[in-house]
Amino acid sequence: MSFQEKNAWACLLAILAAYIPYFSFSLREPIPSVVPVVPLVTAVVFLVILQIVFHALNTIFSKQMGGVGQQPKPDEREQYIDLKASKIAGFVLAIWVVVWCINAMLLLPFVEVATPATNASLASTGNSLASISGTVALWWVNLLFAGFVFTNAVHYATLIFFYRR
């Protein structure tokens, strides 16, 4: 197994280990009373620590290193694999964002546009403009972020697939 393939495995496993607990918590019960940044920062710090440990172990135990202090440069095949994986991940991201936008437009409550005429009628009836609750907004933001994380996982899984092929 090459250095880059081991690195792809390590990154994929680190992403899964850091973000599966985060999304199982945040998408199940996004609670606005809890500061939403704390679980995210915790997941990101955990991911960074895992990747540092995995990369250090890969560097230490890689047979390709042979005492040299740096990782081997990717050859032409590895560059092609990385380009192909990036292209596939880009398509997945584009599809995720388009589907997210369509669902957000169709499923979220519509916010009325205030004009001087509607302001007077809204003020007289006691209604305010339609709004989105904090829980719903957090859920949709986490769902979009899940798309970015999923795309990154697809990138590394595609790298592994093409290295194995």
Image (cartoon, rainbow, N blue to C red):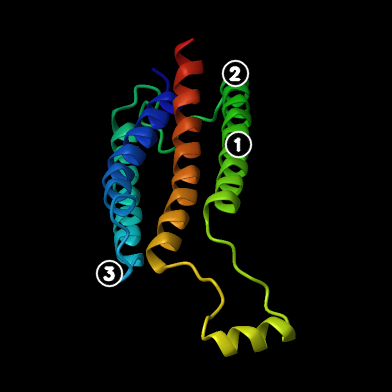
Residue 95 lies in quadrant: top right
Q: Secondary structure at mark 2?
A: helix
Circle 1: element type: helix
At 29% across and 72% down in the image, what residue appears? 33
Report the residue marked by disc 1. Answer: 95
Q: Residue 80's quadrant in the figure?
A: top right
Marks 2 and 3, the one that precedes in the sequence: 3
Q: Residues within 10 Å of mark 2 (few under 14, many from 20)?
A: few
Q: CA distance from mark 2 to mark 3?
A: 47 Å
Query: Regarding mark 3 in the picture, which secondary structure is present there?
Result: loop
Q: Residues within 10 Å of mark 3 (few under 14, many from 20)?
A: few
- Horizontal and vertical percent position of residue 50: 29, 44
Question: Which-is-in-front pick, marks 2 and 3?
Answer: 3
In the rendered image, residue 14, in percent from the top left (x then y), is placed at 32, 39
Mark toward the start of the polypeptide (3 vs 1): 3
Circle 2 residue: 77
**Camera-side residue of 65 and 58:** 58
- In the rendered image, residue 139, in percent from the top left (x then y), is placed at 41, 56
* Residue at the image point whose x is 45% and y is 43% from the top: 149
The residue positioned 55% from the left and 85% from the top of the image is: 125
Q: Which residue in the rendered view is the most extreme toward the right?
A: 116
The vertical placement of 35 against 151, above or below, is: below
Q: Is residue 53 above or below residue 129?
A: above
Amino acid type, label 3: Val
Residue under pointer 3:
34
